Image (cartoon, rainbow, N blue to C red):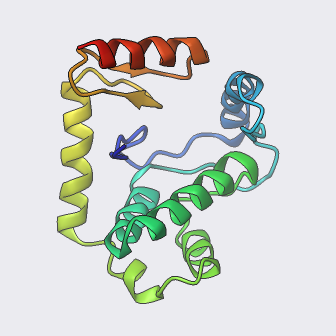
């Protein structure tokens, strides 16, 4: 499985906190579908993330360190956002999360470079060209189309069966 970038908010945009809190009510559905999923409706006064690029840059920087570092950073970003309601676009928050994982600070500081940004936008545009319009999105080799959004487990099983029959 390859994780690719898809920017839900490619441009910085401030969303009013109360509006964002209401939006996060939609997190209840995926939380109810999966026992291990831990989503929490935004309940802090910390401002919501303004755009998707900073956490994507952190994930790409971690990937440069290897798959294990990527997995750690990816999991930590998800938990910080969905469970702890932290603004993962805030540089201070990203540095704190990164350092708590014991990763070299200089790697994250070099993440804001044009090549990584180009890579993120190339993946984002590739996703759009495949019809992705949200997350999560799954595309399987040999199976036309993209499965977007949280689905019941049986939907994923059908997709896998279809891929295996090709």
Q: Quadrant of the C terminus?
A: top left
Q: Which residue is at 31% across, 18% downward? A: 163
Please name whichever residue, 143 or 93, is drawn nearer the observer in this view of the structure.
143
Q: Quadrant of the N terminus?
A: top left
For residue 103, above or below residue 150: below
Name the quadrant containing residue 43.
top right
For residue 47, above or below residue 157: below
Residue furthest toward the right? 43
For residue 37, above or below residue 48: above
* Residue 154 % position (x, y): 57, 12
* Residue 91 % position (x, y): 52, 71
Q: Which residue is at 38% across, 82% downward? A: 107
* Residue 94 % position (x, y): 55, 70
Please name whichever residue, 64 or 24, is drawn nearer the observer in this view of the structure.
64
Please name whichever residue, 8 or 12, is drawn nearer the observer in this view of the structure.
8
Numbered marks: total: 0
For residue 145, above or below residue 64: above
* Residue 132 % position (x, y): 32, 25
Q: Which residue is at 53% across, 46% downward? A: 14
Q: Which residue is at 32% across, 80% downward? A: 110
Name the quadrant containing residue 66.
bottom left
Position of 145 compared to 48: left or right? left
């Amino acid at each position: 499985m390859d994780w690719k970038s898809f920017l839900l908010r490619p441009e910085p945009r401030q969303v009013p906190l109360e509006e964002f809190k209401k939006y996060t009510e939609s997190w209840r559905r995926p939380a109810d579908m999966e026992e291990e999923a831990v989503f929490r409706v935004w309940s802090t006064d910390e401002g919501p993330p303004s755009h998707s690029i900073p956490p994507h840059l952190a994930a790409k920087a971690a990937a440069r360190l290897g798959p294990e570092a990527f997995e750690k950073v990816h999991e930590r970003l998800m938990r910080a956002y969905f469970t702890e309601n932290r603004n993962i676009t805030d540089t201070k928050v990203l540095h704190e999360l990164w350092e708590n994982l014991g990763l070299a600070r200089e790697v994250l500081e070099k993440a804001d470079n044009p090549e990584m940004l180009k890579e993120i936008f190339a993946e984002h545009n590739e996703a759009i060209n495949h019809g992705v319009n949200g997350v999560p999105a799954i595309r399987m080799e040999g199976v036309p189309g993209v499965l977007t959004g949280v689905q019941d487990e049986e939907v994923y099983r059908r997709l896998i069966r279809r891929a295996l029959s090709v």
